[in-house]
């Protein structure tokens, strides 16, 4: 089955190459001992308020109202198309009508205010039949989930004691910056919680993909520039048909921290960012924001860069 990463619904980003095909279906890693039963979330153990958002072939169902604070989001893909959504809070002064007009299906380019929005983090690529989880901090005000179109909901002040000091216990830590990633080591296989912080000056995201063969960052860039999913990089390596998305964390504003849940088999992985550069329209991936790493001692080693 083919899957498609959709960074936003804005056609200009598609033309700029910010949407890329990711063939394959997600193959879940083997469950570890003492983990929740299938379908449950490791992040649910920490007691945060939970909300569920569903998507079915581009139609997103969001709660009418959510209380502000640190919340656990379950994103259920009940359709047959892959989804790579964005969660955002438009900047002050952008009305609901303007927001819907600027981000609707007829929009041909991102509005000038787009990168001034607040991105609290969200789930990563979510394949059909899968549920992804993320713990994020929501501020009062209008938010929206952006997939094929914007789907707004309101975040209202909470009377409850803030849970901001409660931090999920993380198995791995990832730092995002211009233009790269920093991972805690060692990275082990299995189901786990990752804490992700954007220490850069621009919004970034962490999209994880697994490769069936050794691969370099340069080869990943070459793959996403290709229009042929069966083409292989110069010098050999995997094709687009040999890699698959395995979650991650959506757009995250500078200085923000969020948590996601990943389930990793031993092997070779790449981390990429599809946040777009406003000057070129190109995703950060094409500007070098890509890294490769291995998980587990039995994993396929990363390829050695040429030269």
Image (cartoon, helix red, strand yellow):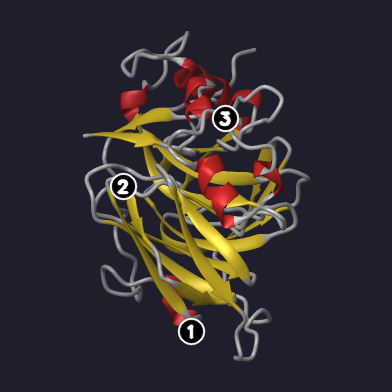
The reply to whether residue 7 is visible in this rendering is yes
Name the residue rendered at 68%, 52% in the picture: 253
Is the C-beta separation of discs 2 and 3 under 8 Å? no
Name the residue rendered at 32%, 72% in the picture: 40
* Number of numbered callouts drawn: 3
Q: Is residue 303 left or right of residue 105?
A: right
Q: Tell me if mark 1 has few (under 14), some (14-19) or many (20+) residues whose alpha carbon lies within 10 angstroms of its own.
A: few
* Residue 223 drawn at (x, y percent): 45, 20
Residue under label 1, please give it: 47
Quadrant of the rendered image containing residue 113: top right
Looking at the image, residue 229 lies above or below residue 58: above
Quarter occupied by the N terminus? top left
Mark 3 or mark 1: which comes first in sequence?
Answer: 1
Residue under label 2, please give it: 127
- Between 117 and 99, the residue placed more toward the observer is 99
Q: CA distance from mark 1 to mark 2?
A: 26 Å
Q: Which mark is residue 109?
A: 3
Is the C-beta separation of discs 3 and 1 under 8 Å? no
């Amino acid at each position: 089955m083919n899957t498609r990463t959709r960074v936003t619904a804005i056609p200009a980003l598609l033309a700029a190459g910010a949407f890329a095909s990711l063939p394959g279906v997600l193959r879940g890693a083997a469950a570890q001992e003492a983990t929740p039963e299938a379908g449950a979330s490791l992040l649910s153990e920490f007691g945060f308020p939970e909300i569920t958002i569903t998507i079915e072939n581009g139609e997103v169902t969001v709660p009418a109202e959510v209380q502000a604070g640190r919340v656990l989001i379950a994103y259920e893909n009940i359709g047959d198309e892959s989804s790579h959504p964005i969660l955002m809070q438009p900047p002050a002064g952008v009305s609901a009508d303007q927001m819907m007009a600027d981000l609707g299906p007829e929009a041909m380019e991102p509005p000038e205010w787009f990168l001034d929005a607040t991105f609290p983090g969200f789930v990563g690529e979510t394949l059909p039949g899968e549920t992804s989880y993320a713990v994020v901090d929501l501020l009062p005000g209008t938010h929206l989930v952006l997939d094929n179109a914007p789907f707004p909901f309101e975040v209202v002040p909470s009377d409850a004691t803030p849970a901001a000091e409660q931090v999920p216990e993380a198995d791995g830590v990832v730092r995002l910056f211009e233009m790269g990633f920093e991972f805690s080591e060692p990275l082990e296989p299995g189901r786990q919680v990752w804490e992700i912080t954007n220490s850069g000056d621009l919004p970034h995201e962490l999209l994880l993909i697994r490769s069936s063969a050794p691969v370099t960052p340069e080869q990943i860039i070459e793959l996403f520039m290709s229009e042929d999913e069966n083409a292989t990089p110069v010098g050999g390596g995997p094709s687009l048909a040999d890699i698959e998305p395995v979650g991650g964390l959506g757009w995250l504003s500078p200085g923000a921290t969020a948590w996601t849940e990943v389930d990793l088999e031993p092997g070779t992985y790449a981390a990429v960012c599809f946040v777009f550069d406003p000057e070129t329209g190109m995703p950060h991936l094409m500007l070098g924001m890509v890294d490769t790493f291995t998980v587990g001692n039995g994993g396929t080693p990363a390829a050695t860069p040429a030269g």
